[in-house]
Image (cartoon, helix red, strand yellow):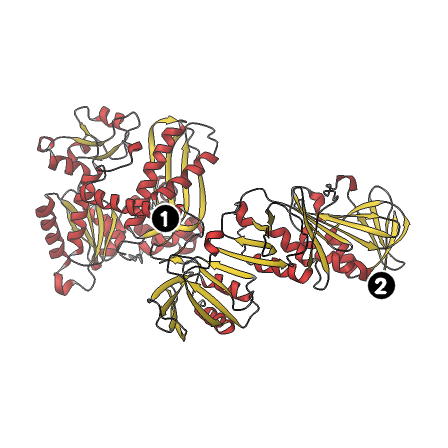
Amino acid sequence: MEFTINKNDIIDVLSKIQGLTGRKSSLAITESLLIKTNSSSITVTATDLETGFEGIYSANIESKGTIAINSRKFYEIVRDFPSNEIRVCETENHWIEIGNQNVQYHIVGMNFEDFPDIPHIEEVDYFEINSIAFIKMIEKTIIITVGSDDKRTHVNGIYFERIFNQDEKKIRMVSTDGSRLALVDYTYDKNIELPQGQAVLIPKKGLGEVSKFLKPTETILIGVQGNNFIIKKDKETMIIRLLEGSFPKYHDIIVKGKAHQIKFDRQLFLMMLKRMSILSSDDYKGVILNFKKNKLMITTTNPDIGESKEDTDINFDGKPMEISFNPRYFIEMVNVIDESHIILRIIDEEKPCQIEGVDDKSFLGVIMPMRI
Amino acid sequence: MILHIDMDAFYASVEQLDNPDLKGKPVMVGGYSKRGVVTAASYEARKFGVHSAMPMFKAKKLCPQGIVVPGRMERYSEISKKVFSLLETLTPLVEPVSIDEAYVDLTGCERILGTPQEVALNIKQRIKEAVDLSCSIGIAPVKFLAKIASDINKPDGLTIITPGQVLNFIESLPIRKVPGIGKVMLKTIEQLGIKTLGDINKFPEKMIRKRFGKFGRRLISLSKGSDDSAVTPHLEPKSVSTESTLSEDTNNLNLLRRRLLKASEQVGRRLRKHRLKTKTISIKIKLSDFKQITRSVTIKEPTGSSKTIYHNAIALLDKYRLPKKVRLIGVGASNLVDSKIPSQRGLFNSGEKIDENWEKVEKAVDDISNKFGKNTIKKAALF
């Protein structure tokens, strides 16, 4: 095979694809890219065995063929290549030549037949969604990270469900680590026809990788086919293998029942939390929120370092309460709310606290207190 | 000055105290099973050459008339507590070394308590009055010499090494008496012609350091009569563990699980006693070929619950495929944190409330055990 590509056409995707090919998998060949020629383009495929990527990029095809080449090395060669035109050519026994008259690389390729199959996509009922909205859904849910040794499926995946009823039509993504929960809705016009289907669990890792490939100003298609979640752009397709497992019944904890509603300036609240979390450590994670009449005092006590306190005026006329929280949880949630003011809904020291923007109700965060 | 107080033949003396029939007779405390060892021997038994850690069958051979009594740890620790609390009325600087041994630092107390000799005689008398047992006391300016001194006139001894006597004492102190020198090291040291601790000074320091590494450095300072280890009152434990040898090697998982249950309860109780929680739970298994295996798991939220410790220990055991029968099994807890540290609540765990309630049950059981003895209340599986 032999083809010539323009550096600018593929440098961006080669850089983004490193997240997938850089991940250790049980097959060594997943560190490689599969490149296949079409009549006037190449198809680049990568996978970490959970998330697959396929993209089509225009190229000058001299002769047909397929190669498997180390992704990292190919990216670095292309990135630092002195000219725009790059010629790639397979010689024999999987040896690959890259270069022009002045620069020459001779690279050991892999046997492309060993490259794992990417699930074949047939007819899928897609949702159309603005890519910026989808990126935000992902960003707001994958803030809840999970330890690499945590095997529980409901914390490794994001719950993707469709809520269709007479009043509204929306898709929802929910994420949790067992102590906190983030929920984002995307509402459609209720007259639009949307595909039905069961709720599914999409791996956080895969969604994180996929969001890199999305540009903010395009319309994309998302859908579920069998065991896979599919994100489709014009020339690029991403396939994430779904997780098998159940997601906890979270509806009880997002009910907006009796609670003290407290409004905060987002930036001030964020800074206050940051100042108070300076003294927290691995062992002493918590800060204490002391609610008194029209006053909130946040205190930190860490026997290894010292103490800190800060107070601020709020609107509060309930019984005084002392509630301990991991401030990092609040900071991460407040960070993804794009409004000037936020609302905290606090019940008591044992019940989850809800957090959302004043106007935009598409995001809801829930945080469980610490046991004092 | 530092005092080292050592109860005389502690377990055996307690047995003789509680059962006057045993007085003046060779008593050997320990297990009678084929693996049993002597944990303590009365002075009458020691005359026959019986000493602690000796296999019981061997002791029986040396001293056929010896009376074997099983140990009663609870009774010993009860008396031990009385002795320690008595020492603590003198000064807070009391460092328990084991159930029957402690260091007391008198520095700065001479004006109140009197001369070290007066204090020592006072301690001996008060222990005699309180628990009717004798002890031996060594007095010296440093810890290691105090310990050696207490061993000199046993039983009921009192030996003082004054600061002026220190160097002379070291000069003639047989090197094998120095704490930390085992059989192997003794051999190397004696090959060098070193017979007493003072002999160390005859060699260039560089050579001693090269030969014995870190311990060499300690030997050099000991040989000059200095010992910078201080008397440290009860340390917060860095880890808690317990293990027990099975009466027979086994691969019976039910039996092993029961052992883990018992061990987990002991570990949990000790954690709660010190108001600590653990983040890392481990099991230790010694196989019939004496090969030792440890497996551990670090949990997200620290726990002080015996139940949680047990569940993690069981999971570790179940994950490990036993290649041989098991000789010894135990549970450990490390990575300890203050139990008052707030812990994160879970959103969905309906089981959390149950765990919280279990912790309350465990605390209540601890209180009952403390008041009425460890065997008054326990898990049905352990009866």
- Please state the horizontal and vertical placement of residue A39, each as a whole percent of the image: 89, 49
Residue on which disc 1 sits: B353
Residue B371 visible, this orientation? yes
Q: Residues within 10 Å of mark 2 (few under 14, many from 20)?
A: few
Q: How many marks?
A: 2
- Most distant residue in the front direction: A166
Q: Secondary structure at mark 1?
A: helix
Identify which amino acid the numbered label 1 is placed on.
Lys
Q: How far apart are the two marked residues, 2 and 1, measured between alpha carbons?
A: 66 Å
In depth, the one of B105 and A274 nearer the eye is A274
Residue B137 visible, this orientation? no
Disc 2 is attached to a residue of which chain?
A: A
Residue drawn 41% across and 35% down?
B285
Residue drawn 24% across and 48% down?
B148
In depth, the one of B99 and A277 nearer the eye is A277
Q: Residues within 10 Å of mark 1 (few under 14, many from 20)?
A: few
- Please state the horizontal and vertical placement of residue B143, each as a whole percent of the image: 26, 54
Residue drawn 86% across and 48% down?
A38
- Please state the horizontal and vertical placement of residue A107, each as a whole percent of the image: 80, 49
Indicate which label's residue lies in the foreground, 2 or 1: 1
Residue on which disc 2 sits: A83
Q: From what the image shows, is residue A226 above or below residue A252?
A: above
Disc 1 is attached to a residue of which chain?
A: B
